[in-house]
Image (tube, coloured by chain):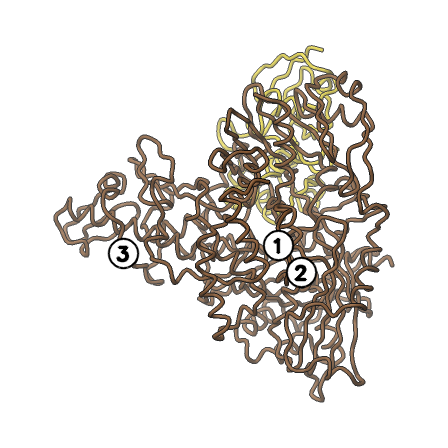
Chain colours: A yellow, B brown
Amino acid sequence: MNVSLRINGQAHTLETEPQVPLLWILRDVLHLTGTKFGCGIAACGACTVHVDGRAMRSCTLPVSAVDGKEITTIEGLGAARLHALQQAWIRHQVPQCGYCQSGMLMAAAALLAEHPQPDDATIDRAMTNICRCGTYQRVRRAIHDAAGQSG
Amino acid sequence: MRFAPGRRRFLVAAGVLGGGLLIGYGLFRERDLLGSPDLLPVEADEIALNAWLKVAADGRVTVAVPRAEMGQGVYTALPMLVAEELGAAWADVHAEQAPIDKVYGNITVMADAAPLDPHDEGIMATAVRWTLARAGRVLGVQVTGGSTSVRDAWLPMRAAGAAARDMLVRAAAARLEVPPEALEAVDGRIVHAASGRALAFGALASEAAALAPPERFTFRPPQARRLLGKPLPRTDVPAKVDGSARFGCDVRHAGMVYAAIRIAPVFGGALERFDRTALENSPGVIGVIPLADALAVVGRTWWHAEHALAATTVEFSPGPGAGTSHEDLFARYAEALAADDGFAYEDQGDARGALAGADVLRAEYRAPLLAHACMEPMNCTVRLGDGTAEIWCGNQAPDLLRLIAADQLGLEPEQVTLHTPFLGGGFGRRAEPDFMRYAIAIAQAVPDQTVQLLYSREQDLQHDTYRPPVLSRFAARLDGDGRIAAWHNRIAGPSVSQATIGRAFPDLPLGGPDKTSAEGAAHLAYAVPDRRVEHTRVDIPVPCGFWRSVGHSYNAFFTECFIDELAAAAGADPLAFRLAHLAARPRESAVLRLLESASAWHESLPAGRARGLALHESFHSIVGQVAEVSIADGRVVVHRVVCVIDCGEVVNPDIVIAQMESGIVFGLTAALYGEVRLDDGRVTQGNFPDYRMLTLKEMPRIETHVIASGAEPGGVGEPGTPPIAPAVTNAVSRLLRRRVRQLPLNAALES
């Protein structure tokens, strides 16, 4: 099928099988590699992107389901100016290996869009991404910090 | 296999690893540490002053980092060593991956392989170190592991900075017509304080490069340091928040293709049957490549390749491990312990004699099989040319992988270019060549194309090089004063070092003691007059490898839990009991005393909560942890962890703290949930839901205190991991009023 996607403000039209997950369109067709593969079953969150502003796990999201939708990836999150979360991530030196951090940031950005001042319980519910380096404490601290900066 | 010069080099390395080695840099000519500036690739405006650093016309300083950045901070800590001595401004400093050359070899990781007491400074141990130092220098294996990066770089990378500074100062002295002694290197400039004149590094680099490096280096005295000891921001963080950081699986070339794989589910099995037609008819499939023990499919995207494999049945013959379950492995260990005393890694006094009588306390502990589960699944990208090969993969041993790749391809190592991008986790897994070997075999079947092999999460979890399951038995006796009089520890499990080296170089004859088996069990800090620690080697039909902190990962659990059992038998407070055995160890005692106050060890907790303590030295650092724990709905909840580390000289305290947080989460995840299960020789789990990871909502508050003892630098990447399992288990045992002697804890609670 023909699919029209708007990714980070740019229009793309491609011919593809409808069931190909968005993740592989991003990574292997468009070579937008900031969005990561971690599990393939929407369990780890490394592939999180925004679809019409909502956090979605792109490894199980068929491209046909996002035809015509507005998609933001990590490359588009702070394209004009670093997002408050990206700045907080730098202040708190959150990343270690860094592999999960694109998904972590996209999940956090969607959280703040919905809850500008999230409490710890809200952060616990929203941030289910897996980080093998154990950056969780800094992730929580940076979300609170970014919420304070924007609020 | 061909017997190339590089291969001979590794034969010596493996022999040394088997036989024991301890290395220092002291006996080398200092200038030899600098290497040739010709090793570094340069842009038009860049000048290399030695093998470790380049200066650009605009003052940018690029440091060649010979270790892999896998989250532990080497792209920051190692450039800090250079920048401190050079006098660079931190904002000007950048990191890039060093090429492969012996000057970048890791001597310390070889040194640590010796089955000696690291505290032994006697004449025999010293002689061993001196003799083997030369061999280590000749071998120059470029391994990232063993928490050695800062320890090994401490001399050569500070020397590289000091030598370059000396050259820049002499170039400035000639230009300004003043004596070199009147000049200072400050924030990227050579400054003549008397006249107020200054020249930027960028303006001096070409004149400096024409000068000979100094014969000897002068290091800045500790009180004059401007960068070391400061929590400077990491050089790799900006790229890791905007999606621009490139990991191995992010390599992209126009027209490249992607491979998925199914490997024989029973280790050592062979490919038997598959439906080629169905695979070839699946959309987007470019090629079907049968290998001896695996089937690969190449597709237009990785999903097309994986989707094709997922839709068909691939049949394999069972390997030699068929029929084995994870429980069977412990039965084998028990049989081996009954039959064989094993190798004594420590034997002081007469432990067996002292434990022949009554009043002996005994306990048996178990640690399970574990996977690494790096967030970035194993992957490797290969492009083969005419007599050349270019390989990209996150790895922890580039020169060894290059040798193996060259051997597989029938090339000389120099014809193979191996790139090491950022690693999405390593933890020991990426020291292995298996995924590269598969990728090369696939590339050989798809000529003239760049091909990237990526494991699915299931393949990654089911074809790891696992932390082995281990069995440990203790017998001990207390004296009349409640001190440990005799200690006998018998451990059973495979040799991880020999398994790893044997997989990389199957033709090597291997044998002898493997220090990693008993590390963290032998040569404990506690004063015990009669002590004996043995390891009985039992091979198992599961590939085992290095897993963050290796032997310490299980031996700390065994020993620090059993110490708590002895404290209870003595009716003593666990912290006071440990201190009573540490009179001769001031650093360990200082860690415990700080832990005592920082954790408020003696203050009472709310009902249903308990504290547990563990102290463990690994990789030349001493770490103590206190965990505050409760049990809710049959699950262990860890509320708070107080961590104290003495890692000697501190390069970047924020990286030390981050590594403690990281090591604790890694060890806690394993302690609560970690267990790879085998059924009929195959791993039964497939993905994160059944190989569970700690998540944010389960994260305890971690408070880390760093003791700047000024001792020689110790490691930080691994030492945070070993103490957390025993600290939490000791708290759980207190809550349950019974001793828990196996992991994972949540499974142990159910039983």
Residue type at tag 3? Glu
Whether residue B16 sits left or right of residue B54 in the image: it is right
- The residues bearing labels 3 and 2 have C-alpha atoms spaced at a distance of 47 Å
Cβ–Cβ below 8 Å for labels 1 and 2?
Answer: yes
Q: Residue at x 79, y 64 (%)?
A: B336
Q: Are marks 3 and 2 on the same chain?
A: yes
Which of the two discs, 3 and 2, sits closer to the camera? 3
**Rendered location of residue B680, percent (x, y):** 85, 45
The residue positioned farthest toward the bottom in the image shown: B480
Q: Mark 1 or mark 2, which has the lower sequence index?
A: 1
- The image quarter containing residue B521 is bottom right
Q: Looking at the image, can residue A71 be seen?
A: yes
Q: Quick one: B722 or B231, which is closer to the camera?
A: B722
Whether residue A87 sits left or right of residue B200 in the image: it is right
Tag 1: Cα neighbours inside 10 Å, few (<14), some, or many (≥20)?
many
**Rendered location of residue A31, percent (x, y):** 58, 23
Total numbered labels: 3
- Quarter of the image for the C terminus of chain B: give it: bottom right
* Element marked by disc 3: loop
Which of the two discs, 3 and 1, sits closer to the camera? 3
Q: Looking at the image, can residue A145 be seen?
A: no
Chain letter of disc 1?
B
* Element marked by disc 1: helix
Residue located beneath label 3 in the image: B215
Residue located beneath label 2 in the image: B724
- Mark sitting on residue B663: 1
Chain letter of disc 3?
B
Residue type at tag 1? Gly
